[in-house]
Image (cartoon, rainbow, N blue to C red):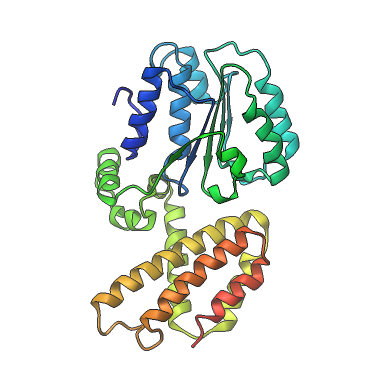
Amino acid sequence: MIYKWDIIGHETQISQLEREIETGNISHAYLFSGPKDVGKFRVARIFANILQCPHDFCRRCKDCQMIANGTHLDTLLVPDDGSTIHIDEVRELIRKTNLTAQSRYRLIVIENIERMPIEAQNSFLKTLEEPPGRTVFLLTSTKVSQVLPTILSRVRLYEFSNVDDPVLETYLRQKFGDHTDLSEIIEIAQGRPGLAIHLIKDPVALSDQRNVYRQIDFFLKKNDLAQKFQFVESVSKGEGATGKTLELFFDAFSRYLRKLLFDYMRQKDHPLRARFTLKEIADLFESLEKTRYLIDRNVNLKLALENLFLQTEK
């Protein structure tokens, strides 16, 4: 690689971006799509830094320092803070793109463009169709199916996937040494470097992961609909807490079922064989993904989760 990206994996995507920089074949708009926490937004930020730095990504000049601090006037960063990007905010973005750039480019870096409702995406589309000169949009998405096809047709699409566990482990050992919980963290992360690093740096987050995983284990081993519905009730309260709890829940449930399917193939005396057949576990996995899909589309959260838990009763 030409530049020091400090990114875990994604060599193919990074090599292609470097070729575009070398040849000057820079698109006016990019969309980096893929799972959450695999490094898409970090790649977008570093790509922006490389484009903007007049000294070949030196990391020391005024431009590099301001980009790192989020204060560069011609590099607008819109990280995902969990909120919707409303049409008024899109109009403000559009206004800023029409200002005269003082740097090499005017860069707009938006994390998870699907946070824009349809009306806001349509407004944003007009700028993508006729972008001001020297403006480059760097967008990311974890749910590309929620991005308008007309937007997708006007961006250069890069697809990112989960990082292989050996690659992730090698990086984490080099950066953090022999962390006590490294094997467990890699298992939880499932190829998502951002999550792995977060869990290493935040023991509370790791404890939360363990607690939810144990709760899923309890839910699948026993018929206790009252406790399951009590959990649903707790998840359904409070917008901020709901989002975090839901993410933990779906992550833990998915990880639990994956491990369960794997163990079923190896253990003839698995303790859950008396409760679930292999097909029933596969069906539960499908129901979990369907529930996540429905909740993403604003189906009643409480009803969707209660229906999922009903399927764990035997």
> Can residue 112 be seen in this snapshot?
yes
Position of 51 relative to 244 (above/below): above
Q: Toward the viewer: 264 or 139?
A: 139
Q: Toward the viewer: 193 or 24?
A: 24
Position of 127 relative to 224 (above/below): above
Residue sitting farthest toward the right: 88
Quarter the N terminus occupies: top left
> Can residue 81 be seen in this snapshot?
no
Residue 7 as seen in the image, left or right of residue 248: left
Residue 287 location (% of width, % of height): 51, 72
Residue sitting at x 43%, y 59%? 207
Residue sitting at x 65%, y 73%? 303
Residue sitting at x 52%, y 80%? 311
Residue 118 location (% of width, % of height): 69, 45
Position of 74 relative to 259 (above/below): above
Position of 40 relative to 55 (above/below): below
Residue 238 location (% of width, % of height): 67, 59
Residue 100 as seen in the image, left or right of residue 254: right
Q: Toward the viewer: 240 or 190?
A: 190
